[in-house]
Amino acid sequence: MSLITAVAGLRCDSRVSWSLALSTFAAWRGVAAAKVLGGIGAGSGLALRWNLIACGLFFCALGFWMRRYDRKRHFEPLTTFLGCLALLAGLGLFALDPQGPWIFWAFVFIVAAAGLALAAFSARRLGIFALGAVGVYAGVTRLAFEVIDAELLGCFWFAGSSLGMIALLWFVQRRFRAEVG
């Protein structure tokens, strides 16, 4: 179904069909991984995470190819964004798992999100920058709640840090707009 929708999206120049094809492909990979492992549940999480990361890398490579070879270039922002989202989601799921080496994965997640934010900042891609910045925020929050008392100081953390994130995104958006105008 994903291939048929992708062909229809490319042929009819429909970004909606293209996004449906990409999301259907990612869902198919997740269901295929779960089916191999006997259903979604204990033990299937690892394969699902790696499938999510692989889909993200594939979508990012596809977006790079579209941009580089000028093939359906207007589909590239969506393809790249979904790839970055899938990649960060897969890494983030590793960071949220209390069973494994979550501290290592939290740092990997933060470094990947920061790298994504820096690359998007230099490319002037606000959506991907916001995704990376929110990823860094989520990773730092994951680490911070191991240090601070979530019940007592959690509200102060979220109030202050979310206002800081809003200010950062507003500043970057204004900067990008000023450079265009």
Image: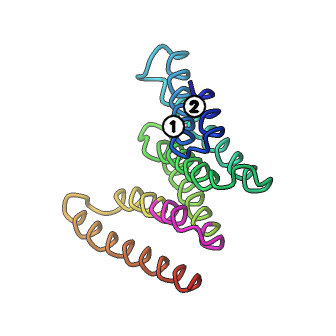
Question: The residue under label 2 is which amino acid type?
Answer: Thr
- Where disc 1 sits, the SS reads helix
Residue at screen point 35% across, 61% down:
147
- Where disc 2 sits, the SS reads helix
Q: Is residue 119 left or right of residue 161?
A: right
Residue at screen point 55% across, 21% down:
32
Mark 1 packing: few (<14 Cα in 10 Å), some, or many (20+)?
some
x and y percentages locating residue 62 in the rendered image: 70, 45
Is residue 172 covered in magenta?
Answer: no
Q: Residue furthest left?
A: 152
Q: Is residue 71 left or right of residue 84?
A: right
- Magenta segment's dominant SS is helix
Q: Which residues are magenta?
A: 120-134
| Image quarter hosting the N terminus | top right
In this picture, is 140 found above or below 25? below
x and y percentages locating residue 89 in the rendered image: 49, 46
Mark 2 packing: few (<14 Cα in 10 Å), some, or many (20+)?
many
Contact check, label 2 and label 1, Cβ < 8 Å: yes
> Which residue is the site of mark 2?
5
Q: Residue furthest front?
A: 12
Task: Check the image and tell me how it is coloured.
Answer: rainbow
Question: The residue under label 1 is which amino acid type?
Answer: Leu
> Which residue is the site of mark 1?
20
Q: Earlier in the sequence, mark 2 or mark 1?
A: 2
Q: Nearer the viewer, residue 62 or 150?
A: 62
